[in-house]
Image (cartoon, coloured by chain):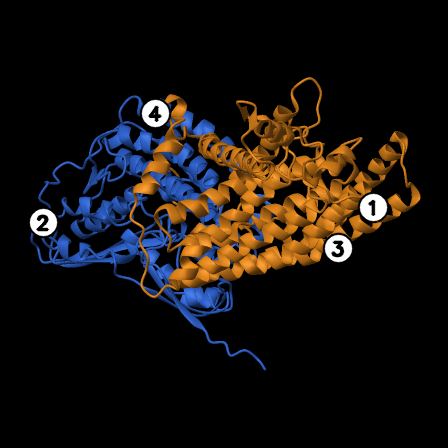
Chain colours: A orange, B blue
């Protein structure tokens, strides 16, 4: 067995199944092929699970947004409209794949693939249950940070190659917000790394004697905000702000290329929820229920919060988003990093009591700094009094002048 | 070596999700910043003014429905007022009260649409819009009781209204009047305190009072600049001189003022309807002796109302025939648009969309 498979029970059982296959006492599958087949099956299973769950989630999202909107949502196809995503997929596959004149066709066709692959790659290092992962990379967190960045390249390629000015606006906004939000996002992860002492996602889960959401409230807030900004969820959805730049970078796309972009966008909240679950909510760990189920419950919890925010808030302006990243999130993440580093320095191997003390300090700092920062911005964003004109009745009912 | 950059010209519209119809803005951007802006109208031109010359005075009422199709009652009222002025017809009292009730309900409906679409332009994925439309539906239900239609009412006639309000109208109106203040409270708690909304609308799209008056801007856009000008007070028509109401005025004249003014005006309209319901008495709803084929004497008249979007006026010239010789519509949407450049140059792309939403235009009225 290779080095990446130790303790990966799913993988090793698959591997042993293939190597153990024999016909008439002869092992028919060589070791290298079994190694490959087991890995392939694992990747196949993960990718398809993610895509199928996302497809069902598009239905759930539309139904839930319908409820938020005070309407029913799609309910025609199948029970509760459950087949709507299937109908959508068939429609998308049957659509004409138009391409405007003057596009850079190579880049134009590559962009959806460049966009969707990183969102799927994220799931390679996420443990979706006890001992269930494709790879336990010792640099898992770094891998996630590196890979998610590539998705923005896909957006930029799409926006640039389209030769449409709205697409260009979207592409430029995507790059600008990525560069801004990558910094606080990475800095917020460093707090986790300090506490864990490892970049491996499995180690991160196992290091959580108490969930890191208690130990790293500020880190959680920053990561949550920065991640929703990076995947263009409301209120940071300037990249494809419908009321401003139509559909942003994928304005010119149609058919399944558009569908690929859309699929990537629907997978992204799952990726972020999975990362949040792993880093802040003890990943797969939980009592009674099987570990895989716990993982999905937690993922759907975060997914629902993301949806809730999306259905509620208006959009920020691009300059406000940039200012928010550099003036609020960046200082906060540096503060968080500083405090966490100090704590790790003081309590090198913390007991439970010390961990809860740490949590108390961190919560106090998180709430205090957030309140202070919002106070500082308060003067600009308070409501304003309105005066009134005259209000006397000029005539009475019979038409007599008062 | 510095990069060579050049401004880029973008056509916002005529096909665009947030131009409120088929409206086109030719905008020159420096990055995201607006350098120049030119509104281009005419994509929805149907020749309503010319069509009116081929219709009898009563038939023109149906044309006015199609001007500002989210405020048809106000259009009806403005038109019949002008013809009544021209023909010297005095409508009976009950008809005037019902007309004012309809016009004020229409103002609430129109302001709900304006608020909902402003929030849609701000990017709030439809939730506020749907909530605003929920209340608008109730108003449309009331109108359906009055005249059987939900959008193109054609409810008003020269010398009165088409038919008296039915029995079930009054209890339903009562219910609406009792519920609506709480719904407006809901909007206020959801929207006016929202920090994203405040930071997006405050000090954006500022219009100074001189420019507003010079451009002949009216309605909430003018009142947001602090100029006290409301035709219901300053040139009272119908029975507006018998009801008490305040005119909310803005202080900074930004998008936030225009937004909050509409919410306050909804409350004032509710109080006007409330007073009308108290004061209304039984009586005829059509003036005796006004034929369906009205032949006003030779001459001209200008009648105007304070519509939801501003001063809506009809200038009618009569040659003594059964159809207007000339009909000119003063549409507030078109005139309110003309100051867009003053409000927006130097602002951002996103501000432009929000400002357009806060001016509250309706393309049916802009292009006529």
Question: Regarding mark 4 in the picture, which secondary structure is present there?
Answer: helix
What crowding class fits label 4: few (fewer than 14 Cα within 10 Å), some (14-19), or many (20 or more)? some
What crowding class fits label 3: few (fewer than 14 Cα within 10 Å), some (14-19), or many (20 or more)? some
- Quarter of the picture holding the N terminus of chain B: bottom right
Residue B181 seen by the camera? no
Disc number for residue B170: 4
Left or right, B21 with reference to B267: left
Q: Nearer the viewer, residue A306 or B249?
A: A306
Residue farthest along the bottom direction in this orientation: B1
Separation (CA) of disc 4 from disc 2? 35 Å
In the image, which is nearer the foreground, mark 4 or mark 1? 1
Both marks 1 and 2 on one chain: no
Separation (CA) of disc 1 from disc 2? 86 Å
Rendering coords of residue B89 (x, y %): 19, 45
Which residue position holds label 1? Answer: A340
Q: Residue at x 9, y 53 (%)?
A: B54
Rendering coords of residue A98 (x, y %): 31, 54
First along the sequence among labels 3 and 1: 3
Q: Is residue B361 above or below residue B100?
A: below
Read off the chain for label 1: A
Disc number for residue B295: 2
In the image, which is nearer the foreground, mark 4 or mark 2? 4
């Amino acid at each position: 067995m290779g080095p990446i498979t130790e303790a990966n029970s799913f993988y090793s059982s698959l591997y042993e199944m293939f190597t153990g296959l024999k016909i008439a006492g002869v092992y028919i599958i060589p070791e290298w092929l079994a190694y490959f087949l087991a890995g392939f099956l694992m990747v196949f299973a993960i990718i398809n699970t993610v895509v199928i769950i996302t497809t069902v989630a598009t239905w759930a999202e539309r139904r839930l947004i319908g409820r938020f909107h005070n309407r029913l949502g799609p309910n025609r196809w199948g029970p509760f409209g459950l087949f709507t995503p299937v109908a959508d997929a068939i429609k998308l596959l049957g659509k004409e794949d138009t391409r405007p004149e003057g596009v850079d066709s190579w880049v134009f066709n590559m962009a959806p693939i460049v966009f969707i692959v990183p969102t799927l790659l994220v799931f390679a290092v996420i443990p979706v249950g006890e001992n269930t992962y494709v790879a336990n990379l010792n640099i898992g967190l770094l891998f996630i940070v590196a890979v998610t960045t590539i998705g923005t390249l896909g957006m930029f390629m799409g926006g640039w190659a389209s030769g449409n000015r709205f697409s260009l606006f979207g592409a430029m906004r995507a790059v600008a917000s990525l560069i801004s939000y990558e910094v606080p996002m990475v800095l917020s992860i460093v707090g986790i790394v300090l506490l864990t002492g490892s970049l491996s996602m499995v180690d991160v889960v196992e290091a959580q004697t108490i969930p890191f959401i208690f130990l790293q409230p500020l880190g959680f807030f920053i990561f949550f905000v920065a991640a929703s900004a990076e995947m263009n969820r409301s209120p940071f959805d300037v990249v494809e702000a419908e009321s401003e730049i139509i559909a942003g970078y994928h304005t010119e796309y149609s058919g399944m290329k558009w569908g690929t972009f859309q699929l990537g966008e629907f997978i992204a909240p799952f990726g972020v929820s999975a990362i949040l679950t792993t880093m802040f909510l003890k990943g797969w760990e939980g009592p009674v229920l099987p570990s895989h189920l716990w993982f999905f419950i937690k993922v759907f919890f975060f997914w629902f919060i993301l949806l809730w925010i999306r259905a509620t808030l208006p959009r920020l302006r691009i300059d406000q988003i940039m200012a928010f990243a550099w003036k609020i999130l960046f200082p906060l993440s540096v503060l968080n990093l500083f405090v966490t580093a100090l704590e790790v320095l003081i309590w090198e191997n913390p007991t439970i009591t010390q961990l809860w003390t740490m949590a108390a300090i961190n919560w106090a700092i998180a709430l205090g700094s957030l309140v202070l920062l919002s106070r500082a911005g308060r003067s600009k964003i308070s409501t304003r009094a309105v005066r009134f004109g005259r209000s006397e009745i000029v005539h009475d009912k019979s038409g007599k002048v008062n | 070596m510095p990069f060579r950059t050049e401004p880029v010209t973008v056509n916002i519209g005529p096909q665009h999700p947030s131009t409120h119809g088929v409206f086109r803005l030719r905008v020159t951007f420096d990055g995201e910043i607006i350098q120049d802006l030119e509104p281009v109208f005419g994509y929805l031109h149907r020749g309503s003014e010319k069509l009116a010359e081929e219709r009898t005075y009563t038939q023109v009422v149906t044309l006015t429905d199609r001007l500002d199709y989210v405020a048809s009652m106000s259009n009806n009222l403005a038109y019949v007022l002008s013809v009544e002025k021209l023909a010297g017809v005095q409508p009976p009292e009950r008809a005037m009260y019902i007309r004012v009730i309809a016009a004020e309900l229409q103002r609430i409906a129109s302001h709900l649409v304006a608020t909902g679409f402003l929030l849609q332009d701000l990017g709030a994925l439809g939730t506020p819009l749907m909530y605003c439309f929920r209340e608008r539906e109730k108003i449309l239900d009331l109108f359906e009781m009055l005249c059987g239609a939900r959008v193109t009412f054609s409810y008003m006639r020269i010398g009165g209204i088409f038919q008296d309000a039915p029995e079930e109208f009054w209890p339903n109106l009562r219910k609406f009047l009792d519920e609506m203040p709480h719904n407006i409270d809901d909007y206020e708690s959801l929207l006016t305190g929202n920090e994203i909304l405040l930071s997006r609308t405050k000090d954006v799209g500022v219009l100074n009072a001189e420019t507003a008056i010079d451009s002949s801007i009216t309605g909430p856009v003018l009142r947001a600049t602090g100029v006290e000008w409301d035709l219901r007070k300053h040139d009272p028509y119908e029975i507006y001189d018998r009801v008490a109401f305040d005119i909310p005025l803005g202080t900074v004249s930004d998008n936030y003022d225009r937004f909050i003014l509409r919410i306050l005006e909804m409350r004032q309209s509710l109080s006007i309807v409330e007073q009308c319901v108290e004061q209304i008495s039984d009586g005829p709803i059509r003036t005796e002796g006004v034929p369906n084929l009205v032949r006003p004497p030779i001459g001209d008249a200008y009648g105007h109302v304070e519509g939801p979007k501003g001063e809506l006026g009809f200038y009618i010239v009569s040659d003594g025939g059964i159809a207007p010789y000339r009909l000119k519509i003063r549409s507030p949407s078109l005139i309110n648009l003309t100051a867009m450049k003053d409000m927006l140059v130097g602002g951002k792309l996103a501000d432009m969309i929000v400002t357009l939403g806060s001016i509250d235009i309706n393309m049916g009225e802009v292009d006529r």
